[in-house]
Image (spheres, rainbow, N blue to C red):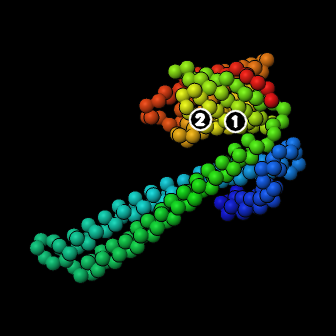
Amino acid sequence: MTPRCCRNLIACLSSLLLLQVAAGPARAQVEIGGEDEAALRALRQLVQLEADLLAQAQVERLDALELLRQAAADLEQSATLLSRAIQGTEGQPGDEDLIAEAASQLASRKVAIETALESSRALGRRVEEHARRLNSLRDRLARLEAEAPDTAGPLSGTWRVTINPGSEGGELAIRQFGTLFAGQYDLGSGRTGSLRGTIVSGRIKAEAIDSAFGKDRVFFGLISDDENELTGTWEATKLGTGRPAFGEWKARRKTTE
């Protein structure tokens, strides 16, 4: 799908979503189904499409930066040729035709580097805009999922969680929507944030968004046969922070909603 098609689809889905959630938070208090479920699906599609557009814009910007680097090298080469043409050889002044040709090439490459620079800047603005929209859509999705009642699912409820190393403990509240889930955590250390992920065949993968550090950790785990215990490992998404880069975690069900 081309970027233009993606943007058109995003516009259509946005219109659909606005119609479905226009009634505000009160609409989310009814049972998920029909329009509410369609709104969640539409918003998830918007998030995925915007993520795809962001990734494509990032690749295009890297290509533009490489073109800018090459244009800068060409400009430097042309400046060197012009300097040599002006100096001439063996004490003789440079040939006027060679000087004119080198000067023309230098001017042409100056235009090329200005064009490459503007293209790079434009793509940089595109990357920032897609990133801003993606963050906004993700926040909106997290709010909608948190407000909507959960359907039956083994993860729904409140869990006492322990994260190692450090025996960091706290509570995790989760609502499950089919194979998707979202939640909020509050750790005894004072750290809070949200969690979103998937559960397929008892296997869990979740992304933690810390209120202070942003996208912080990815959790992997399994739910026990009696659906009352979670165990697994985690990996940091940001290295060089002075905090542990990986570890283990476990959780025990506190209540069932």
Q: Are marks 2 and 1 in contact (CB under 8 Å)?
A: no
Which image quarter is the C terminus in?
top right
> Residue 6 location in percent, x, y?
70, 58
Q: Amino acid at mark 1?
A: Gly
Q: Which residue is mark 2?
A: 192
Three-letter amino acid code at disc 2? Thr
Tell me which residue sits at (70%, 29%) in the image: 204
Q: Residues within 10 Å of mark 1 (few under 14, many from 20)?
A: many
Front residue of this view, candidates 246 and 115: 246
How far across and down, in percent of the image, does residue 128 sit?
54, 57
What SS does tag 2 mark?
strand
> Element under label 1?
strand
**Would residue 241 be found to the left or right of residue 252 on screen?**
left
Residue in the image at 40% along x and 60% along y? 70
Q: Which residue is mark 1?
A: 183
The quarter of the picture where residue 89 lies is: bottom left
Residue 129: x and y in percent read: 58, 59
Report the quarter where the N terminus lies.
Answer: bottom right
The quadrant where residue 111 appears? bottom left
